[in-house]
Image: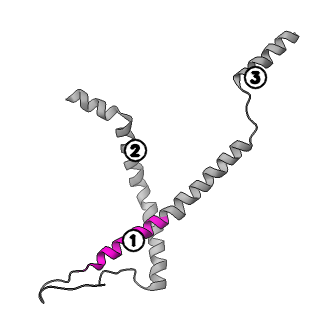
Amino acid sequence: MIKGFKEFIAQGNALELAVAVIIGAAFKPIVDSITKVILDIVGQIVGSPNFDSIGQFRIKETADYIQPGTILTAAINFLLVALAVYFCIVLPMNKLRERTKKAEAEAPAEPTDVELLTEIRDLLAKN
């Protein structure tokens, strides 16, 4: 059982997952900051971006309100986070990756091993 656990931990998948979780945790403050800015902008344009009270009701007069609008608030917050991550992180990184690939494609190709060996052979033949 211990041997199987060691093999599982040593697999690339477990290690990659651990690294992804750590990087994700370190990345969270960046996403939170971007989302906060977007929510502040939306809040100033539309008012409070909170839809909790939409459709609220209660079954008994003494009971607390049931707020199905919290689902709408959570869904909109999710979409705002997704938009923030896409437009502020994913899209710029994709553009940077495209520029890097384009620059690499425009760079002169390095000679292959066969070309280098042929050149060395020709130089040796001349001497």
Residue lying at 66% horizontally and 51% vertically, measured from the top left: 99
Q: Position of residue 67 (x, y in %)?
A: 25, 80
Q: Position of residue 74 (x, y in %)?
A: 34, 71
Instruction: Label 3: state its secondary structure.
Output: helix
For the residues labelled 1 and 2, the Cα–Cα distance comes to: 26 Å
Q: Position of residue 24 (x, y in %)?
A: 40, 53
For the rendered model, the colour scheme is: one colour
**Disc number for residue 19:** 2
Question: Could you say which quadrant of the image residue 18 lies in?
Answer: top left
Q: Position of residue 84 (x, y in %)?
A: 49, 66
Span highlighted in magenta in the image: 67-84
- Dominant secondary structure, magenta: helix
**Disc number for residue 6:** none
Amino acid type at circle 1 is Asn
Q: Which residue is the site of mark 3?
A: 115
Mark 1 / mark 3, whichever is N-terminal: 1
Is 59 placed left or right of 72 in the picture?
Answer: left
Residue lying at 48% horizontally and 67% vertically, measured from the top left: 83
**Looking at the picture, does residue 37 appear above or below residue 10?**
below
Mark 1 / mark 2, whichever is N-terminal: 2
Amino acid type at circle 2 is Val
Instruction: Label 2: state its secondary structure.
Output: helix
For the residues labelled 2 and 3, the Cα–Cα distance comes to: 41 Å
Mark 2 / mark 3, whichever is N-terminal: 2
Disc nearest the viewer among 2 and 3: 3
